[in-house]
Amino acid sequence: MKKRKIAALQLGSEPLGTAATLEKIQSYQTQIKATGCDLLVLPEALLGGYPKGADFGTRVGYRTEKGRDDFLHYWEQAIDIDGPEVSALSELAISCKTCIVIGVIERKGSSLYCTALFISADGDLAALHRKLMPTASERLIWAQGDGSTIPVVETHAGRVGAAICWENYMPLLRTAMYAKGMEIWCAPTVDDREIWQSSMKHIAYEGRNFLVSACQYLPGPTNKKAKEINWPINQPFIRGGSVIISPMGEVLAGPIFDKEGLISAEIDLDEIVRARYDFDPVGHYSRPDIFKLEVDETERSPCISNKNEEFPKQ
């Protein structure tokens, strides 16, 4: 038996900004330790914030100066990969002896990415995944990731990968990730609808892997103090729905709604093999003689020198 403990922490971005959100995460250190979890998953865009309801002053063919200011303030709350927030998360991972997968808004130059960070139990930034297809108006503010950040990471909990929010509805992405031998599917999100629960059960059952979805919980209108940092939106209500699901589509913990909280479940990785006895989506049930998927994992740079090197270095 290959017993492990996996967990999801449901909470929301603080209206006072990224520093306050990081403090909130750190306040759960004792509870995280108490679970003894090998993997902890946190929601989409937790550090940096998910600007639900914001329009950044944009209509087709039309932008406002206020919208530009709103983007600037949002950009200021994003994090740098080599910044202090990642260092603090690394310390948390070491202290709690757990791998952390967390959704952040990553700042690279003047552009932003909706990113999932993979931090090992040793505190190393093991990998990152940038959302390949921001949904609808998200494309106004987030750049698209490329094929170079679709990792599956070896951790003590198992082989871990992540798809962010509606990326989970991309069937070819799911197939590519299944083919990497993933054992634990992480789904950081802000989708609190009932159908999300059905989707999570389906993906766990389709991939025959364990699944952890962590959703933000936001209780309602923004505290007026948020105006101190020019937060561009009024905080919406997001009810949560974090859940842990087995390879047979059975709910192991959660979903939890309308509150912050930490959920966890003990798993046995051998259950994956048992579940794939009659259905392995990239093995005996895949028919590669008929279907073929090619995945381009090349890193795409906007500027390449004539020496075929990235330029400028960032």
Image (cartoon, rainbow, N blue to C red):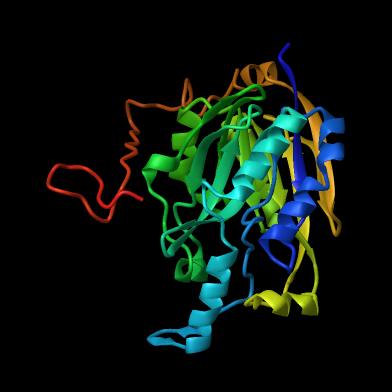
- Tell me if 62 is positioned left or right of 205 in this view: left
Q: Hey, which quadrant is residue 272 in on the image?
A: top right
Q: Hey, which quadrant is residue 29 in on the image?
A: top right
Residue at point 47%, 63% (across, down) = 142
- Tell me if 118 is positioned left or right of 27 in this view: left
The one of 198 and 309 positioned closer to us in this rendering? 309
Residue furthest to the left = 306
Does residue 76 appear anywhere in the picture? Answer: yes
Q: Hey, which quadrant is residue 233 in on the image?
A: bottom right
Residue 65 is situated, as x and y percent measured from the top left of the image, at 48, 88
The one of 181 and 120 positioned closer to us in this rendering? 120
The one of 42 and 285 positioned closer to us in this rendering? 42
Residue at point 79%, 53% (across, down) = 24
Residue furthest to the front = 84
Q: Is residue 195 above or below residue 310?
A: below
Residue at point 63%, 27% (across, down) = 122
Q: Please state, as top left, top right, bottom left or bottom right, where the N terminus lies in the image.
A: top right
Residue at point 83%, 48% (across, down) = 27
Q: How many marks?
A: 0
Does residue 192 appear anywhere in the picture? Answer: no
Residue 292 is situated, as x and y percent measured from the top left of the image, at 33, 33
Residue 119 is situated, as x and y percent measured from the top left of the image, at 60, 36
Residue 191 is situated, as x and y percent measured from the top left of the image, at 67, 58
